[in-house]
Amino acid sequence: MKKFMIINGPNLNLLSRREPELYGTRSFDDYLPELRSYFPDVQIDFYQSNHEGDIIDKIHEVGFSYDGIILNAAAYTHTSLAIAEAVKAVTTPTVEVHISDLTLRESFRQHSYLRPVCVHTIGGLGLDSYRYAIISLLEDETQIPAAQSGAPNY
Ligand code: DQA
C-alpha cells in the first residue's frame, strides 16, 4: 500500500473559520475522511503545524520512506528557503498544494520557493486541490522536480 503524508502549514488549522470566502467553510478534519474515501488503497496521513521547524522535521521524518508528500506550506510557500531545501534534501516526491488560486492574488504570493523543488503545483480547486495532488502522485510515473523538467526556475 502506498503511503502519502499531507502536511499543512500555518493558519490552516483555522480552515472553516479563516477567510471563508477564500478558503471555504469546511475544516480539514471534516474533509479528510472524504479524501481518504476516494483512495481506499492508499494510506493518507495528515500533519499540521504553525511552526517552520516542525514542518521541516516532518519532511525529514517521512521523506525517505513515504511515496509522496502533499505540502500546503501556506505563507511559508512565499518565504521559506529552509522548507524548500528540506523538500529538495529528501527522496520522496512532493506536490505543492494551495486551496486558493495564487495567480489571481497579491503579487507577494506569485513567488514560491517550493515550486522548483516540487514535482507539481496544484491550486485553485478549493480542498479538491488535495485530491488532484494525490492523483498526480499516483499517475505521474516520472516525478521530476519542476526545476529539472524545463519549467521556469524562480
Ligand atoms: C494558501 C495560499 C497562501 O498564499 C496563504 O498564505 C495560505 C493558504 C492556500 O492554500 O491557498 O495560508 O497556501
Image: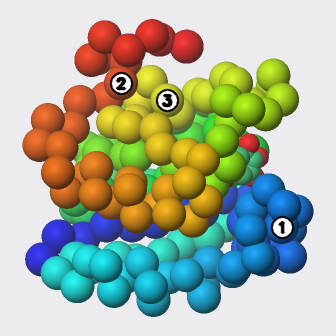
Secondary structure at numbered mark 3: helix
Q: For residue 154, say whether it is visible.
A: yes
Where residue 88 appears, x then y in whole percent?
Answer: 39, 33
Q: Are marks 3 and 2 in contact (CB under 8 Å)?
A: yes
Sequence order check, earlier mark of 1 and 3 = 1
Q: Nearer the viewer, mark 2 or mark 1?
A: 1
Q: Quadrant of the N terminus?
A: bottom left
Q: Give amino acid for label 3.
A: Arg
Q: Give amino acid for label 2.
A: Ala
Residue behind mark 1? 20
Q: For residue 72, say whether it is visible.
A: no
Residue behind mark 3? 115
Secondary structure at numbered mark 2: helix
Q: Are marks 1 and 3 in contact (CB under 8 Å)?
A: no
Residue 112 marker: none
Q: Is residue 61 above or below residue 106?
A: below
At 57% from the left and 65% from the top, the residue drawn is 127
Q: Nearer the viewer, mark 1 or mark 3?
A: 1
Residue behind mark 2? 146
Sequence order check, earlier mark of 2 and 1 = 1
Question: How far apart, in angstroms, are the residues tagged by discs 3 and 2?
Answer: 7 Å
The crowding category of the residue bearing disc 2, from other C-alpha atoms within 10 Å (few below 14, some 14 to 19, many at least 20), is some
